[in-house]
Amino acid sequence: MDDPTALADPPTTAPNARSETIYRHRLATRLWHWINAITIFIMIGSGIGILNAHPRLYWGQYGANFDHAWLDLRPYGNILRSGWLTIPAGYNLAISRRWHLLFALVLGFGLLVFMIASLINRHFQRDLRVRAKEIGPRHLWADLLAHLRLDFHNPEDPAAYNTLQKLAYVVAIFILIPLMILTGLAMSPGMDAAWPWLIELFGGRQSARSIHFIAASGIVLFVIVHLTLVVLAGPIEEVWSMITGRWTLPGARSSEPPPPPLAEPEAAE
């Protein structure tokens, strides 16, 4: 689980010999990764800016100061209003909303294009399909122990996803991000008028706001784990592979970065 947001496509290797460098991330995957990195960063900052307007969360259709909140973030107001966390640096609800809505479009359409591309090149079916035997307790425990040993790759197929990677990607791509998009639409007055069933689906506007916050918190946790594992797996090599597409096998890594990729993935000589 060394790189959870950067989704990889199947590597291309030489047919008669195992190459030390494989083509791991195709152009579409790399573009989606870096666009998402910027988008999520801005949406988190602007989202905190919006949350500062009323840092209490409710269930149901309505919620105001005198209603019971299941989560009250006012005690953490000094942290939430930190200039390095919010967009803009000072409190400005209107600007925070504009940034948030703009990059919500980027997030939504980016996910749509990525899903279409991944269905066409069979990336989902080939790399992210979770098989029944992989979610057995014994297999999951072995995968967890391997992570604790900082052993992230199968020596026989080092570019393959392990089970925890697959589960993390599936949760992020098919649950958390779609939930953020749909609950964001449910909170929009315009969409509420056009699609009243959407807000009913989530049990009311305040419920949609709470689910939106929970899904966003899941993405924040996902990013923290991702960055931690990238550092543990070797940040230079991991970042370089997401720039060039080429990834050097762990046992063959040197202090020098791998050469830049050719126009099309070819077997490394």
Image: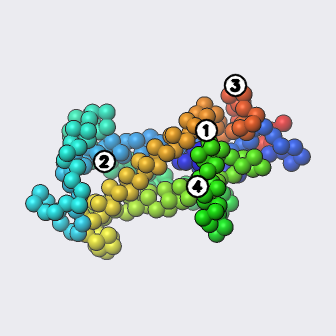
> Which secondary structure lies at badge 1?
helix
In the image, taking residue 235 as reference, residue 171 lies left or right, namely: left
Compared to 94, does 126 lie above or below? below
Q: Which residue is mark 1?
A: 233
C-alpha separation, residue under disc 2 versus residue under disc 1: 30 Å
Compared to 248, does 206 lie above or below? below
* Rendered location of residue 186, percent (x, y): 30, 64
Q: Amino acid at mark 1?
A: Ala
Give the residue furthest to the top.
Answer: 255
> Which secondary structure lies at badge 2?
helix
Q: Which residue is mark 4?
A: 164
Residue 26 disc label = none
Proximity of marks 3 and 1: CB atoms separated by less than 8 Å: no
Q: Amino acid at mark 4?
A: Leu
Comparing marks 4 and 3, which lies closer to the viewer?
4
At a point 58% along the width and 55% down the height, the residue shown is 164
Of labels 4 and 3, earlier in sequence is: 4
Packing grade of label 1 (10 A; few <14, some 14-19, many >=20) is some
Q: Which residue is mark 2?
A: 47
Of labels 4 and 1, earlier in sequence is: 4
Q: Which residue is mark 3?
A: 256
C-alpha separation, residue under disc 2 versus residue under disc 3: 40 Å
Q: Quadrant of residue 24?
A: top right
